[in-house]
Image: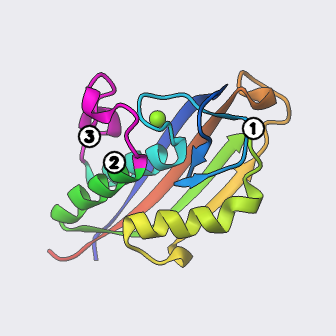
Amino acid sequence: MKIRVGLGFDVHRLVAGRECRLGGVVLPHPTGPLGHSDGDAVLHAIADAVLGAAGLDDLGTAFPDRDPRWKDADSATLLRECAARARSAGWRVGNVDVVIATEGPRIAPHRSAMRARIAEILGIDADDVNVKGKTLEGLGALAGGAGVAVQAVCLLQHDGN
Ligand code: MG
C-alpha cells in the first residue's frame, strides 16, 4: 500500500474580542485567534498536513485570505473540503498528530473534545487523532499567551494502484 506523510504548521495571534476556537472546539478564554477565518490554527495546520501529504498545494492557495467568501469562515468547512480533495485523489487519512504550543488557553482539559471533533470533520476514528499541548517556557514572541503555534502531521493511505 502506498502511504505518504504531510506536515502542517500555523501560527495566530491571540487577541481580546475573538472567540477562542481551536481544534474545532470553543475554549473558555478571554482571548482568541485573530484571523480572516475563525482563526482555528489547529484545523489550519491539519489541513496543510493533509494537503501536503496529498501533493495538493496548501491552505492559503486553496482558500486565499483576501477572498471575502472565507471571511469569518468556519475552519471545519475548510478542513472538510481539504480532506474531500485528498479523497478525490484516492487518499484517505490514516492518522493525525498535533502539537499546540501556547501559553494562552489550557489545552489539556479539551484534548478529548478536540480529538473527537477533528475525527468527526475528517471522517475517521477519534483513536486516529492525537492532540498535545505544550507551554513555551516563557520564551519567544508567543510567550505569555500572545499567540498560538501548531504543528500537525498526517498520514495518508492510497486506496489502490
Ligand atoms: Mg491560519
Q: Is residue 124 positioned above or below 70 on the image?
A: below
Magenta-drawn stretch, dominant element (helix, strand or loop): loop
- Coloring scheme used: rainbow
Residue 135 vs residue 116, the one in the foreground: 116
Q: Residue at x 75, y 37 (%)?
A: 104
| Residue 104 circle label | 1
**Magenta span contains residue 40:** no
Residue mark closest to the camera, 2 vs 3: 2
What whole-number distance in Å separates the C-alpha atoms at marks 1 and 2?
Answer: 24 Å
Whether the residue under disc 2 has CB within 8 Å of ligand 1 = no
Which circle's residue, 2 or 3, is located before the other in the chain?
A: 3
Amino acid type indicated by mark 2: Leu
Q: Residues within 10 Å of mark 3 (few under 14, many from 20)?
A: few
| Residue 78 circle label | 2
Q: Quadrant of residue 14?
A: top right
Q: Residue at x 42, y 28 (%)?
A: 36
Horizontal and vertical percent position of residue 49: 41, 50
Residue 154 vs residue 62, the one in the foreground: 62
Which circle's residue, 1 or 2, is located before the other in the chain?
A: 2
Q: Residue at x 49, y 55 (%)?
A: 153
Q: Is residue 80 visible?
A: yes
Residue that numbered label 3 is attached to:
57
For the view shown, which residue lies furthest in the right direction?
Answer: 137
Quadrant of the drawing holding the N terminus: bottom left
Q: Secondary structure at mark 3?
A: loop
Q: Is residue 160 positioned above or below 142 on the image?
A: below
Q: Secondary structure at mark 1?
A: loop
Q: Residues within 10 Å of mark 1 (few under 14, many from 20)?
A: many
- Side of 115 relative to 142 (left or right): left
Which portion, as a residue range, is magenta? 56-75
Q: Is residue 96 positioned above or below 8 on the image?
A: below
Q: Is residue 130 visible?
A: no
